[in-house]
Image: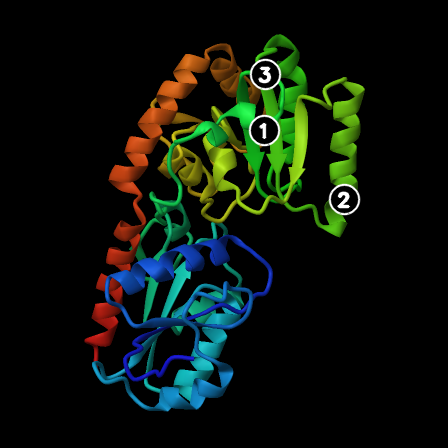
Amino acid sequence: MPPLDDITVIAPHFKRRLSGVTSTVVQLIPEQRRLGRGIVTLGPGLPDDLPKMTWSQLPALWRRPRSAANRVWHARRNNEMLAGILLRDVLRMPLKLLFTSAAQRHHTGYTRWLISRMDAVVATSARSGSFLKVAHTVIRHGIDIDRFHPGESADDAIAATGLPGKYLVGCFGRVRHQKGTDLFVRAMIDLLPRYPDWTAVISGRITAENQGFADQLKADIALAGLSSRIVFLGEVDDIRPWYRRLTLYVAPSRNEGFGLTPLEAMASATACVASDAGAYAELIVEDITGKVVPAGDYARLRDAIAGYLANPAEAIEAGSRGRTHVVENFALVREASALETVYNGLLDDK
């Protein structure tokens, strides 16, 4: 429980379950602290090693930090914006409110009202920014290029998994219709009989409401006689080695906020085929680091995947180019540095 005198940014996290926002906060805050920013989180669902303030410390926010006239309350969800408004406007705490929006849809009237009360707004992509009705800054998410890196050892090869074949193609994330898991499975059922050197892996959480969806996918795989070559891994403790073991990563989402997984894959020197959901089209360089297809278009998705299954050498080259692309354009320090500019503008605003 750190003292708050040198803390200038509060990053609330009002959700217990793992989400894309959680992943962003977990990766970003250590990088922000390395840049010298006094920042803490508030709320559940985050690792113990992240710096946190407690609910009992909230009254301390009435006292200004040593180095600024106020603090920044950096919200990423509606309930976090609302809490900030209450702290600033009702309890009169010296706070500036910042909201980061990843949503790619028209906001409800309630959300628009919340956003209108913010002192500054960040969009995680040009596409998400197009749905905002207020001035904003586009700051795309970055990735920790040291945590996500190309293979370095025998453990990073398909042989370490005990799975058949020479190459792995994977799809990671929650197993559900929104994520397009069914499109990936359908493509694998259609393609793998033609490409015997390839095996497919699926990793991600299956919630109770999506158990029937997952069971049907497994039944379809069994009916096709491919249960040994289309494998559900479940939730794994560390997904990073699996990215390194892949030759091709597929992100077939029908709908997405931002979507970090293509960056994680490319940082691991893995080629990507993705839908144009979320920010995917702003992350992947067409025919250089992978391919982007219209969300929900099964035929285009299958054909894009097939091109790489037929030519693994091209997938390997695209993966190598992907690593270079992420290092040059999406290193986490770029996101942290861009946020520093926004924070400083708010902290300098008396």
Gap in angstroms between the C-alphas marked 2 and 3: 28 Å
Label 2 SS = helix
Pointer 2 local density, CA inside 10 Å: few below 14, some 14–19, many at least 20: some
Question: Residue 174 is drawn in which quadrant?
Answer: top right
Q: Is residue 78 above or below residue 24?
A: below
Q: Amino acid at mark 2?
A: Gln
Which residue is disc 1 drawn over?
A: 161
Q: Is residue 334 left or right of residue 150?
A: left
Pointer 1 local density, CA inside 10 Å: few below 14, some 14–19, many at least 20: few
Residue 165 has which mark? 3
Q: Position of residue 61 (x, y in %)?
A: 37, 86
x 40%, y 15%: residue? 314
- Label pair 1/3, CB-CB below 8 angstroms: no
Residue 211 has which mark? 2
x 39%, y 61%: residue? 100
Q: Position of residue 94 (x, y in %)?
A: 32, 85
The nearer-to-camera label among 2 and 3 is 3
Q: Amino acid at mark 1?
A: Thr
Gap in angstroms between the C-alphas marked 1 and 3: 11 Å
x 27%, y 52%: residue? 333
Residue 205 has which mark? none
Q: Quadrant of the N terminus?
A: bottom left
Q: Quadrant of the C terminus?
A: bottom left
